[in-house]
Image (cartoon, helix red, strand yellow):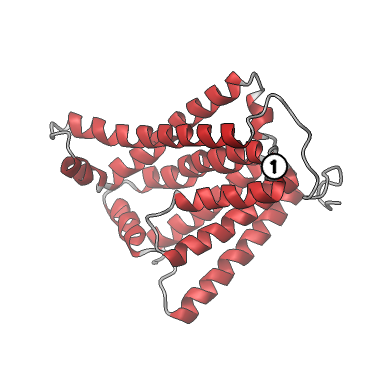
């Protein structure tokens, strides 16, 4: 039994079969489509900015435009509507309710507090390990990007992109759509938590292996809380709080 939600079954129980839910292969294939939509939305914003500036539409030009903090913030932000549109289409084809499919239910304050405390413990443990190993707590390129954005007047835009748009896009994909379908397949809940966390980690391949390990452990906690509270809003809020704290500390209080 779960102390926060006694009606939830143990992790080992097989979910009831629901014809309105994509199972393993359907979820996997649609996951690729949704990720591609997110990518197109993000790259499309960079291409648009390059076109507006009169730059040639080539890789070098897009890399130059994308290095600007405001442009990067726009790119991250535009991934959100693209992701939502692709997920809505996948859910619509199954004739399921969007809110129910993604478990867009507001958690209780007790669930939110429990999730936040667990997240803090994980982050503090990694912070302590980083200091013991003499490693930076935040990837160097992110520190430079955020401080550059602050100095160029793009702080609020970056704050929105990384603390609102990115958490929503990534949670809708990982703990929303992927978890929902995979947990209803042969993977069951434990497999869905593990695999969705792995996919979420892959989305962050710009980091090195050390930071990827941290991302993966946080993903496992988010997945568990998604199951425990049956609420995607809970993981979105936790993800947003984690990113918000990191962005604010890096921008204004040092790395």
Vertical position of residue 193 compared to residue 231: above or below: below
Quarter of the figure that contains the C terminus: bottom left
Give residue 182's quadrant in the image: top right
x then y, percent, for residue 173: 54, 39
Give residue 188's quadrant in the image: top right
- In this rendered view, identify the residue nearer to me: 195 or 129: 195
Residue displayed at 37% across by 32% down: 41
Q: Which residue is mark 1?
A: 186
- In this rendered view, identify the residue nearer to me: 204 or 186: 186
x then y, percent, for residue 114: 72, 56
Residue displayed at 49% across by 39% down: 169
- In this rendered view, identify the residue nearer to me: 129 or 13: 13
Residue displayed at 39% across by 41% down: 76
Vertical position of residue 121 compared to residue 167: above or below: below
x then y, percent, for residue 156: 39, 45
Give residue 175's quadrant in the image: top right
Residue displayed at 68% across by 54% down: 115
Q: Secondary structure at mark 1?
A: loop
Circle count: 1
Vertical position of residue 138 compared to residue 179: above or below: below
x then y, percent, for residue 21: 66, 29
Residue density around tag 1, few if under 14, some if 14–19, many if 20 or more, within 10 Å = few
């Amino acid at each position: 039994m779960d102390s926060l939600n006694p009606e939830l079954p143990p992790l080992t129980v097989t979910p009831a079969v629901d014809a309105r839910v994509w199972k393993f292969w359907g979820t996997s294939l649609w996951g690729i489509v949704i990720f591609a939509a997110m990518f197109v939305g993000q790259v499309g914003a960079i291409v648009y900015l390059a076109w507006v500036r009169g730059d040639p539409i080539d890789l070098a030009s897009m890399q130059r435009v994308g290095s600007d903090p405001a442009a990067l913030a726009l790119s991250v932000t535009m991934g959100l509507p693209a992701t939502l549109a692709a997920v809505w289409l996948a859910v619509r084809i199954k004739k399921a309710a969007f809110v129910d499919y993604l478990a867009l239910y507001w958690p209780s304050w007790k669930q939110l507090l429990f999730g936040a405390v667990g997240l803090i413990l994980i982050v503090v443990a990694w912070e302590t390990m980083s200091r013991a190993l003499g490693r930076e707590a935040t990837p160097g390129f992110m520190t430079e990007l955020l401080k550059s954005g602050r100095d160029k007047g793009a702080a609020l835009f970056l704050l929105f992109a990384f603390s609102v748009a990115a958490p929503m896009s990534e949670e809708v994909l990982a703990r929303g759509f992927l978890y929902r379908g995979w947990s209803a397949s042969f993977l069951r809940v434990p497999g869905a938590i593990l695999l969705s966390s792995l996919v979420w980690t892959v989305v962050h391949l710009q980091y090195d292996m050390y930071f990827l390990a941290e991302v993966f452990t946080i993903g496992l906690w988010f997945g568990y809380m998604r199951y425990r509270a049956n609420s995607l809003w809970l993981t979105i809020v936790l993800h947003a709080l984690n990113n918000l704290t990191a962005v604010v500390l890096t921008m204004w209080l040092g790395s």
